[in-house]
Structures are given as C-alpha cells and as structure tokens.
Image (tube, coloured by chain):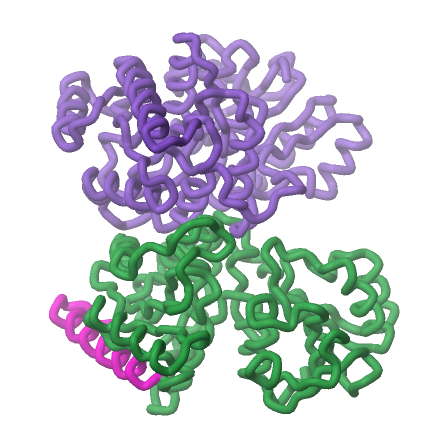
Chain colours: A purple, B green
C-alpha cells in the first residue's frame, strides 16, 4: 500500500467509519483521500476529527490512488450493495482492494474474476490463516509480558490504547510489539489475526500462534475485542483473553456510554466489569490484574472529561488517563511497574521467565 | 439414516469415541455395528459399556449397512489419514457418510467426486447454516424456559444430561425440546447447530436462531459446550451461554476428574465454577441461577460415587444426582420448580412471559 483512497460513502462518521479513522490516525502519510460523494469538498479533519487536510472526494477520478480501502466494518460485515459499483470501478482502474468485511470480497465471483483479469490483488484482511487450530494452552508459559486491552463495551478505543502503549514502551527503549486482532489493527500494522472471523473453536489457538511468533519482544500489546459483558461478542472476548493469557490488562471505558452498543442493556458498573476480567484471566494466570484505566472522553467537555477520569480513579484506585487528551504516560508507567513486579514474583517462585 | 455402521477404528474407548457412545446410547435401534478391526468379535457393550450386543466388526463387508458414521470428534477435527481408505470403500459400496469432523469430508475433492459419481450423500453435521450472523440479543426475551447444561470441564456429560432432563420433562407431559449444539447431539436429534464450527462472531447468533425457531416448546434443554474454565474452549462456552440466555443452568461435573482435559491445570473448586457461571449468565438474565448438579461418577465405585454426590450437595446446597446411576428425577424436579418460581417472578414484575 502506498496511495490509499478510503471508501466510506454515506457512512463518514466516527461510529460506522471506525476502520477509516484508525487508518487515518496511524497511516496518515499513506492516505490520499476519502471517498464520500455526500461530503465531497470537505476534509477528513473537519468530518472525522482525524486526517487533517486529507480531502474527501466525490469519485474515483478525483484523486490519484493505487489502493481502495473499505473503511467500514459493519456488524455482520457484508459489502453494502451500493458499494459494489465503486469497488468494480476501482478494480477496472487497476487499484488494489483492501477489505476487512466478514464477507470476503475475493469470494465474490464477479469481482474476483475482474481482479484477475486486471492483474490486481484483493486483500481480505479478515481471512484467517489456513493453519490455525485448537489452542495448546501455551501462551501462559511465554516469557513475554502480555498486556491486553479489555473494555466495558465494544468500540471504546481498545486498539488505539494498545497502539499508544506500544509506542510509549518503544520510546522508552523497550522491545514492544502491537498484536492486531481486528481488521483495522491489521491494516495499520500489516500483521495479526482477525479473531472474530476465525472458527470459534480456534480463537484461542489463533492468538496463541501470534504470541508464540513474537517471543523476541519483551512486551506484547494485544488488542482486545468486544467485551465480556457484551452479549453479542463476549465469546470472542473470552477466547481471546484465554488464548493470550495476559499478565496485565488495561480496562478501556467510554465515559459517555451508558448502554451496551446494539443492546437495550445498561453497562454494568466499572467495579463489576473489572472484577469479571480479573476472575476470568486468573483462571489461567493467577497473577493477572488490571493495571490501569483508559477513559475515552472524546464526546465530553474538558470539565466533564476530568470528572470522568477522577471517578474512574476513585472507583478503582488505578492510574487513569485519556490517551488522546492527556497522553499515554500513566499507562506506560503502570505497565513497566507491573512487568517489574511480575518478574520479581516469578523469581521468588523459582521461575525464570 | 436407518442402518448405521459407526467407524471408530483403533479409537474405541469412551474418551476418543464420545460421538460413537452418544449415538449408541440414544439411537441404539439404528446402529447395526461398529467398525474397529483391532476389536472385531467383541460387542459394543463389552468395550464401551453402551450398545449391548451390537457387534464390533473388522471390515465393511462384515455387516449390512447403508450409512457410515464417523464416531470420533478429535480436537482440531481432521479425518485420520488411515480412515480415508475406509470412507472411500464405504462410498464405493453406496453407503452415505455422516461426519462431525471440523474438516468437512464433503470438501475433500476426491471423496466428494466419488460420492457424486456413486450418487451418495455426505452429511457434514458441523457445517454451519449459511444464513447465520451476529446475535440480536433476542433470546433473553423468549417466553421459553431455557435450561443450559454447563460444566467444570469438557467431556463430562452435558449432552447426556440435557437429553435426560428433556426426556424427563416430556414424560411429565411438558412441551420440552433438546437443542443440540455439537456434532453428536445433532446426529442424535437430527437438528441443531455445531457452535464450535461457527465463525466466532456468530456463535451467539447461531444459538439465538435455534431458540427463536423453537418457541412452540415450553422448555428448551440447550446442550452446553466446553467450560468457562477450559482455556481451549471457553470462548465457545461463553458465546453459547450469552446467545441462549438461560434462566436455569445445570452444572455437570466428572467426579473422577482433577485436571482440565488437555491442559496441565487443576480444575477450580465447584464453588468457584458455579459462581463464574452465575456471574456471567446474570450479565444478561439477572434471575439466572444454577438449579442442580449432575455428577458423572462412571469411573467410580458405588461407595466413592455416593461420597462424590454428597460432597457436591454439601458444597452447593442444590439437588444432585448421577443421571445414569440414580436417574434424572431430582434435576427434572429442580427445573420444574425453577420454572414456576421464574414465572411468578416475571408476573410480579408485570412481565407476561
């Protein structure tokens, strides 16, 4: 990928275009435009709050791009019918296609045949590796320090927090690596596995494979998915949690959220959510704990944001930040402290991690 | 299916041949033999403790059968190479193939082509329905009383307990239905969905679909899978639990088990396991509770079995039985009591279930 045009036609808002905003934030220099005829002439910064002056264009002709990246990840994950024409047009112009939809674009006979004729590739980043299988329960013995972001709901910023902590650790000279577990993270980092697209029996095995393949790092920042209290996705969340067997978790909250997304249900209290994650993680790793709280206050005023951070700190007694508003430093410090304590604990038990 | 030959070549033991023993127990009249050359001449009853005089034969020629049913469900689920010849031979003889393996036999090009040429069908019971998607979080509003079997480990008898409670309720004149969630249950009941073969994002949606399709029943006995404390399968377990949103759970224990199967880890205490299931179920259904304990004492002497039942009762204060040794009655009574209490609770809240 080099010159990316992101397709979000009619869906250019932070909720629907989660993939677009992630790519705009972390691969800014590779993006040449965003395609949405309903907003042509505006900039990404104006509409999405990320991407600065990158233009929103009305058609494929309006910008020089070599890759069309589908910038939405709808629940259920099919290509909106109206978008097929745009994808077809892009392939006809010789552009490569990058998609994170559950329904693989490369399985669409017409589009696949057209791509073959034009000699362009279709990357379905959610397609699972062919060789995954059931977990061997091996990640818990890995010498890496595994930090897993977990949430009180889906779409609260777990990927972003993982990426920021990873960067913070590397800036302190530590060997850290971000492990993507969803389509946007894979588009940003170029590797990983979309665990929600894996056969359910193989979720733990899929992330275990990533852990074992990255043992040259000291720290693994493993992106969380869904939530233990989100009834649509909780199975993916727990398979991932047990598959990566984290020593440390960072609990991510959206301070403006009161109901579980797509569900007519209140979000349980932060204490209850934190307690559930620690109970479930300790089934595998008795030392495991939540070491910090990342509060997403993007929809709140400065004053309300500070109240939300104070509340999270008072409730949990843990370091708290909004990584966008106030930076990631408190969480990087918390992870480094936890890693040190864990190594001391391991030595005291005669285990050399 | 009418005349079934079950293939368990070299694997005729209760652990590997879980599928075979389930089919032998609940479809006894349809099974004409079991194929294992290493045990030819013995009976199913002698070797597996079920199936009585049904013979174990050494080759396809030794018995008149129209269906070859693959009687193992190995972890990861591939067809053992040595068995391909037998499956090929069966197809050549015009037999239909029933398989619960993760790797679909009908995706094997050679076997699929042969089956087409011979005009026989291959049933991959684990193949998910084409139209499943993400859950709509709808099962919790179903007027059915949903009873879910859950376990402290995998392979402890959850399917059997579900089938026995279902039968017990029907014998009392109640409209009850067994909902299969694994390959053996589907082979026995002829319907259901193998949730462990579904894309992980769709597990809750897959079982929700079964609940909504069976609302003409009063009671749904939903077979559990894996265990919340089994790190290889916990994601499937939780997706299933939240997808079916049970009011009542029956906790299934194997009294002779101390370690989690395939894992070098002790099984947590019964109190802890029970507590985890109730916490996770109550995220969705605050009324939800464990109403009884089914202890599998098949590997214990009478005396040790009674000790195990006493211990489970003293620990939990709940009705306890081994459904094979002592019958299912205490659990049927417990489910009927729970259903009555739940309906009273719903009425007191102004909800008409």
Q: Please, what is the dominant secondary structure of the magenta stretch?
A: helix
**Residue at figure coordinates x 48%, y 57% from the top left:** B261
Q: Name the quadrant containing residue A248.
A: top left
The answer to whether residue A47 is visible is no
The magenta segment is B328-353
Question: Is B19 positioned to the left or the right of B242 in the image?
Answer: right
Which of these two is toward me, A3 or A137?
Answer: A137
Q: Name the quadrant containing residue B7.
A: bottom right
Q: Is residue B204 above or below residue B18?
A: above
Q: Tell how many labels.
A: 0
Query: Residue A103 placed where, x, y %?
Result: 59, 43
**Residue at figure coordinates x 69%, y 74% from the top left:** B69
Which of these two is toward me, A268 or A94?
Answer: A268
Residue A185: within the magenta?
no
The answer to whether residue B153 is visible is yes
Q: Is residue A294 above or below residue A277?
A: above
Question: Is A166 positioned to the left or the right of B39 in the image?
Answer: left
Q: Is residue A335 above or below residue B239?
A: above
Query: Residue A70 placed where, x, y %?
Result: 56, 29
Which of these two is toward me, A350 or A229?
Answer: A350
Question: Is A66 positioned to the left or the right of A202 in the image?
Answer: right
Query: Residue A331 placed where, x, y %?
Result: 30, 20
**Residue at figure coordinates x 30%, y 63% from the top left:** B141
Question: Is B148 positioned to the left or the right of A313 in the image?
Answer: right
**Residue at figure coordinates x 45%, y 45% from the top left:** A239
Which of these two is toward me, B74 or B314?
Answer: B314
- For the N terminus of chain B, the image quarter is bottom right
- For the C terminus of chain B, the image quarter is bottom left
Query: Residue B99 placed where, x, y %?
Result: 67, 67
Residue B347: within the magenta?
yes
Q: Is residue B86 above or below residue A59?
A: below
């Amino acid at each position: 990928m080099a010159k990316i045009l992101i397709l979000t036609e009619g869906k250019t808002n932070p909720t629907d275009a989660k993939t677009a905003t992630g790519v705009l934030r972390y691969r800014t220099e590779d993006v040449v435009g965003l395609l949405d005829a309903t907003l042509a002439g505006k900039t990404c910064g104006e509409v999405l709050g990320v991407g600065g002056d990158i233009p929103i264009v009305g058609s494929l002709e309006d910008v020089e791009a070599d890759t069309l990246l589908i910038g939405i990840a709808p629940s259920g994950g099919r290509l909106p019918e109206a978008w097929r024409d745009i994808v077809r047009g892009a392939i006809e112009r010789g552009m490569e296609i990058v998609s994170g939809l559950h329904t693989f674009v490369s399985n669409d006979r017409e589009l696949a045949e057209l791509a073959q004729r034009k000699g362009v590739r279709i990357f379905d980043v959610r397609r699972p590796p062919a060789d995954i299988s059931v977990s061997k329960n091996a990640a818990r013995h890995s010498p890496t320090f595994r930090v897993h972001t977990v949430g009180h709901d889906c779409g609260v910023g777990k990927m972003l927090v993982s990426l920021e902590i990873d960067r913070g650790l590397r800036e302190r000279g530590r060997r850290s690596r971000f492990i993507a577990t969803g389509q946007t993270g894979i588009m940003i980092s170029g590797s990983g596995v979309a665990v929600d697209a894996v056969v359910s029996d193989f979720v733990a095995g899929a992330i275990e494979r990533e852990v074992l393949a990255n043992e040259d790092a000291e720290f693994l920042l493993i992106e969380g998915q869904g939530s233990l209290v989100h009834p649509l996705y909780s199975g993916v969340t727990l398979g991932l949690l047990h598959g990566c067997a984290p020593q440390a978790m960072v609990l991510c909250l959206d301070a403006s959220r009161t109901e579980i997304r797509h569900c007519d249900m209140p979000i349980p209290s932060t204490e209850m959510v934190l307690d559930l994650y620690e109970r479930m993680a300790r089934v595998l790793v008795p030392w495991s704990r939540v070491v910090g709280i990342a509060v997403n206050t993007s929809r709140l005023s400065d004053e309300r944001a500070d109240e939300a951070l104070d509340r999270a700190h008072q409730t949990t007694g843990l370091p708290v930040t909004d990584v966008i508003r106030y930076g990631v430093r408190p969480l990087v410090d918390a992870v480094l402290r936890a890693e040190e304590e864990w190594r001391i604990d391991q030595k005291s038990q005669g285990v050399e991690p």
